[in-house]
Structures are given as structure tokens and as C-alpha cells.
Image: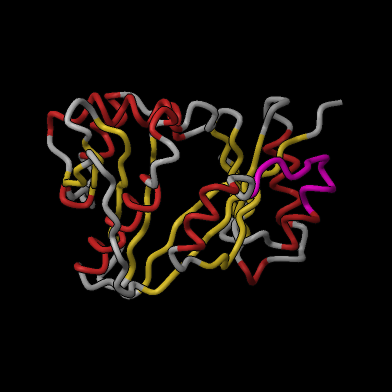
Amino acid sequence: MWAYGDDGFALLRGSSLDLAVAPSSRRHGVGTALAVAALAEAPDDVTAWSHADDPAARVLADRFGFEAARELWVMERDAAPVDVSSVEGVTIRSYRDSDADEVVRVNAAAFAHHPEQGSMDAANLAERMAEPWFDPAGLLVADSGSGLLAFHWTKQHSPEQGEVYVVAVDPAAQGRGLGKAITAAGLAHLASLGVHRIMLYVESDNAPAIATYSRLGFRHTSTHVQYARIPG
């Protein structure tokens, strides 16, 4: 970790770089100095996120040979009532301990090409479930009677704010309306908790998911950008 007094810091974790500068200290070379120090020890495949696509971060990225590699959308909606549709032969219910292996399996299939979510294994699932915010009632699963077809993991951040944390549909079960049904069931659960707003993160190039969320009343409100260093 590199610190510039109380004005900012840079933290390198493997190939992931975090760099933050206090608002009152920006435009004084603090970010540049921290980037120079951190990148001198960073691997070639280093990446860094710019939250809310900050213009200053864009300039800094360009200066050090980075280009935008991923865009993560933030979408939001009010916690208004939603209609939960049924899917023939499927029961949507809350998580049980016996569902753990199926949740890992569905997640791996749904996020096979996702750089972070796709790596969740049984140990990581147990770790997430040990977090203080975890509520089994907020993890909705679509049960076919012979296994799970989808799940929607919700999260409550505060009395006012809820999140669509993860929605996963087994690719073998797509085309049956499961994505909309399981998402709506999770929204209904969050609304029952009394939250006012519900948000989610989605990859900007995931057109099917964005279409589903848009039909459920979500609107794009901001963008996080991941920058990667250009080889050469």
C-alpha cells in the first residue's frame, strides 16, 4: 500500500489496483504520484475500477496506458409492488441448507464466463452466508422437484435500500420465463421488508438481463468502468 499523507492511497492486490484521492486534494498531482509508485510494482495485466465513471480517472487511465475493458451498469427502481408470474412445474421458495450444492451448480452454469461470480464454490458460498446481512428468506430458488433451475439472492443494505444481489438461471432452463419470475419474486420479498429503493449491478453488454430488468421497471442510473493496461 502507498499513502500520500492524508490526501490519498493506492493499494495493489494481485492484478487489481485501488487508488483514491481525497476530493480536496485532487488536481494537485496526488493521483499521478500514487499511480507511478503502484504501477512500478504492478503486473502487466493490472486492472482498476473507476466508480461512477469519474472524468479525472478517465484522464489518469489514458495517461498511464489503460483502456476501458468492462462497464458495469447500476440500475434502480422504487420498491413498488410487482406481479410475480408462475412457471409451470416450478415452485419458487426460500433457500434451505440442502440447496447449497444446487445453488453452486446453477451459479457455475449461469456465470461460466463471468470473471468474478463464476468462481463461487461451496467454500465461498458458505463464506457469503456467514456475513451478517445474509437472510435465508431473501435467497429465492426455483425448484423443479428434481433440482434447482434458478435463484435470486437479495440483499438488504439498510431499512431504505435493497439490492438484487445475484440472479442466476441455468442455461438449460432458459426460455421459460424463469428470469422474470424469480427476479419479481425477489423484488416482492424486498418490498415486504419495507425498503424504498432497489438497485442492482449488471454488465453493460448483458442485453437479455438488461431487457428483463427494464421490463420490471429498472432504469440505468450510473456506470462503473474497469480499466486494463494496454500491452506493449
Q: In this view, does 93 lie above or below 79?
A: above
Q: Which residue is drawn at the image coordinates 23% and 52% (left, top)? A: 133
Type of colouring: secondary structure
Q: Quadrant of residue 229?
A: top right
Q: Quadrant of residue 163?
A: bottom left
Residue 207 percent coordinates (x, y) = 60, 48
Residue nearer the viewer, 201 or 45 = 201
Residue 186 visible in rendering: no
Q: Which residue is drawn at the image coordinates 67% and 67% (left, top)? A: 25
Magenta segment, which residues? Answer: 60-71
Q: Which residue is drawn at the image coordinates 56% and 60% (left, top)? A: 6
Q: In the visual, does 13 lie left or right of 147?
A: right
Q: Which residue lies furthest to the front in this view?
A: 88
Residue 10 percent coordinates (x, y) = 60, 45
Residue nearer the viewer, 208 or 105 = 208
Q: Which residue is drawn at the image coordinates 26% and 63% (left, top)? A: 188
Per the image, is 65 magenta? Answer: yes
Q: Is residue 191 above or below residue 138?
A: below
Marker count (numbered): 0
Q: In the visual, does 178 lie left or right of 76?
A: left
Q: In this view, does 202 lie above or below 143?
A: below
Residue nearer the viewer, 12 or 94 = 94
- The image quadrant where one finds the C terminus is top right
- The image quadrant where one finds the N terminus is top right
Residue 226 visible in rendering: yes
Residue 12 percent coordinates (x, y) = 58, 36
Q: In the visual, does 141 lie left or right of 76?
A: left
Residue 223 percent coordinates (x, y) = 61, 59
Q: In the visual, does 194 lie left or right of 41?
A: left
Per the image, is 97 magenta? Answer: no
